[in-house]
Image (cartoon, helix red, strand yellow):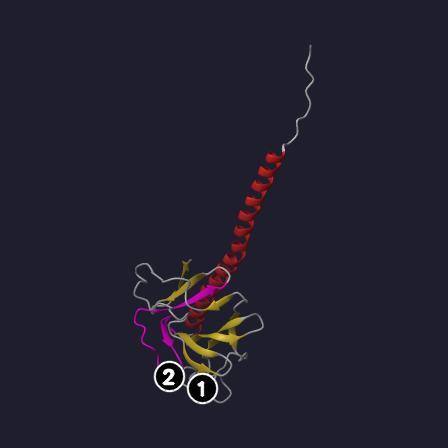
């Protein structure tokens, strides 16, 4: 006698297991995707900043004049908080406070200044120039560079509408010097650094600028 068989289907327990597995996989995928976007954004801005520093140095070498990258960590912008401007000292006297009338002057310049700007970066909403997510341990030969414990190792003072500020000046030979508030260069014999930190990711990218010029970024997560 032949036995007739049919589709048994899923039992309730099997269905619950399948639903649970789908839930776990979905949760893992969501967590991964939710971290992927801010990580990509952080990496993109860090790369853009490194490219901007490289461009400023190349401009200084090509023009045979100083080119300065000015950081305003607390400046409000249409996209978020934090603005970085690149200025060429074509009129001379930009850093010394002796620029001709009508020319840009670091001592009086504010984050809203727009004429004669070579390049500009406004940080997106989830990124700040702020202390890294954890302690920074830079590899040799950058281990002696001043760490960005406050987000920008050379930014101090108060600028109307901008809070603290700092500047990296490249001279006509591509060498970097660092300025805090208006005045003489700050002493950073081994170089200085800036941290771009993601509030969504709790991670950072640290830009290191040695005195000989150039720049490198390191991940801190």
Q: What's the distance in space between the residues labelled 1 and 2, CA to CA?
A: 14 Å
Disc number for residue 47: none
Q: Is residue 187 magenta?
A: yes
> Is 94 drawn above or below residue 55 in the view shown?
below
Q: Mark 2 falls on what kind of element? A: loop
Q: Residue at x 45, y 64 (%)?
A: 50
Q: Quadrant of residue 92?
A: bottom left
**Looking at the image, can residue 65 be seen?**
no
Mark 2 is surrounded, within 10 Å at the Cα level, by few (under 14), some (14 to 19) or many (20 or more) other residues, namely: few
Disc number for residue 183: 2
Magenta part of the protein: which range?
A: 171-199
* Picture coordinates of residue 112, whole percent (x, y): 54, 79
* Picture coordinates of residue 108, whole percent (x, y): 47, 85
Q: Mark 1 falls on what kind of element? A: loop
Viewport quadrant of the N terminus: top right
Left of 37 or right of it: where is 66? Answer: left
Q: Residue at x 57, y 70 (%)?
A: 79
Q: Is residue 173 magenta?
A: yes
The mark nearer the N terminus, 1 or 2, is 1
26 or 158: nearer the viewer: 26
> Is 108 drawn above or below residue 153 in the view shown?
below
197 or 89: nearer the viewer: 197
Q: Nearer the viewer, mark 1 or mark 2?
A: 2
* Picture coordinates of residue 188, whole percent (x, y): 32, 73
Q: Quadrant of residue 16?
A: top right
Which residue is disc 1 drawn over? 99
> How many dots with numbers?
2
> Is 106 drawn above or below residue 36 in the view shown?
below
Mark 1 is surrounded, within 10 Å at the Cα level, by few (under 14), some (14 to 19) or many (20 or more) other residues, namely: some
The single residue placed furthest to the bottom in the displayed view is 101
The rendered magenta stretch, by its main secondary structure, is classed as loop
């Amino acid at each position: 006698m032949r036995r007739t068989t049919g589709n048994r289907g899923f039992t309730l327990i099997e269905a619950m297991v399948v639903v649970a597995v789908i839930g776990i996989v979905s949760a893992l995928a969501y967590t991964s995707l939710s971290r992927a976007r801010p990580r990509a954004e952080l990496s993109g801005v860090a790369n853009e900043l490194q490219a901007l520093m490289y461009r400023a140095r190349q401009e200084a070498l090509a023009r045979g004049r100083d080119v300065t990258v000015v950081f305003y960590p607390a400046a409000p912008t249409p996209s978020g908080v934090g603005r970085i401007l690149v200025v060429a000292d074509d009129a001379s006297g930009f850093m010394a406070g002796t620029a001709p009338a009508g020319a840009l002057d670091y001592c009086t310049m504010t984050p809203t200044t727009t004429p004669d700007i070579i390049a500009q970066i406004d940080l997106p909403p989830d990124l700040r120039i702020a202390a890294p997510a954890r302690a920074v341990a830079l590899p040799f030969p950058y281990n002696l560079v001043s760490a960005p414990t406050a987000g920008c190792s050379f930014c101090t003072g108060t600028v109307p509408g901008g809070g603290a500020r700092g500047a990296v000046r490249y001279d006509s030979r591509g060498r970097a010097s660092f300025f805090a508030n208006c005045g003489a260069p700050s002493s950073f014999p081994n170089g200085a650094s800036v941290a771009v930190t993601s509030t969504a990711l709790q991670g950072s990218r640290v830009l290191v600028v040695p005195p000989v010029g150039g720049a490198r970024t390191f991940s801190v997560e």
